[in-house]
Amino acid sequence: MITSKVISKGILRAIGTIILVCLVLFFIYKIKIVILYLCISLIPCLIANPLLQFLKTKLKFKNTFATITTLFTFILLLIGFTLLFVPLIISQAENLSLLDTNVLKNQLEVLESNLEVYLKLYNIDLVGIIQNFNLSSNLDFNLFTNFINTVLDLLAGFGLGLVSVFFITYFFLKEQINFKENIKKILPDNNEEKILNSIEKINYLLTRYFIGLLVQLSVVFILYYIVLVIFGGENAFIIAFLCALLNIIPYIGPIIGTVLAGILTMISTIGMDFKTEMLPSTIYVVFGFLVVQAIDNNISQPIIFSKSVKSHPLEIFLIILISGITFGIFGMVIAVPLFTIIKVIAKEFLPNNKIVSILTKKL
């Protein structure tokens, strides 16, 4: 029989549970930067793991020495990258961020005037089109400079957490075996093998994915840079670097990068003859970027998004699309790794489910 005392206890228990959950969520929110460092540390850990295993198995390095060598290699690569490229990136980014927005607006008006004269030859009314869109009054000319300043701020903030990330990565690499042993102790015996198999497969697939993604971005950056050096003129390095980073966002990133490259190329060539220099340079850059994207879409992406995580291209496209609609750009970036994790876990725990068996038949 349900009495008032039982009801009171149930209400108090529910309130206590809600308060506990709220406290846990508040605690997680307060330490979100630590959680971010842990998540970031997993990426270099996954990328470095093949090198660590090579040193331990092929060269017979001790675990600690192999870990130190692996991490030291990453630090040397980072220092080398910094010494060679970052000063150039920062100097060019500062130059772009210090652009006078009034001058930028005037340059766009000059660009519109040149376009109008050129398109009149083909009976195209550019003035009417621009008036309908009210381009000059609605465009925020501080958007680009704010973006550059935001990137610089992020670089500065990343520097503060760099030591923390490397420290965590060191112990992730060094204590892999101990982590597995400790996990075994706390896992329920009936699911221990399935969970450990899932962790091993996830580690393998995500390692392949992140290494492939790193190679893809490097190849795209080099190709973009070649195109911009040949046709784009000034600021080729920083433009190629930013556009390559945008490729982290599947499908949409390359489109944004192409538009950005076209706009920056037109701005950097203002003062040249519009018909013979400015317009051809922009067209060549945009066309070159489209060729790079065609190469990337038909070679790099199928290997990374399909073969590395063993999923069908249409399957990957739909997951990225759904994640983008639901969670925006962040959802698109994490869609493939998260989907891979879910698939591996589903295969281990629901192998007889028909839908799971279809989706995971390549795993």
Image: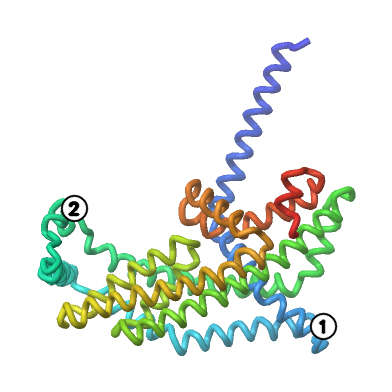
Q: Which residue is mark 1?
A: 57
Task: Name the quadrant of the N terminus.
Answer: top right
Numbered disc in front, either 1 or 2: 2
- For mark 2, give the secondary structure: helix
Q: Residues within 10 Å of mark 1 (few under 14, many from 20)?
A: few
Type of amino acid under label 1: Thr
Which residue does the image show at 28% across and 68% down from the upper left? 145
Looking at the rendered structure, which numbered label has been put on residue 133? 2
Asked which quadrant contains residue 335, the reply is bottom right
> Quadrant location of the C terminus?
bottom right
Q: Is residue 136 left or right of residue 150?
A: left
Q: Is residue 294 left or right of residue 28?
A: left
Residue 272 at what x, y percent from top left?
16, 83
Please say if 237 is above or below 109. below
Which of the pair 140/129 is nearer the observer? 129
Quarter assignment of residue 86 = bottom left
Residue 292 is left or right of residue 212, and the answer is left
- Residue 6, x across and y down, in percent: 73, 17
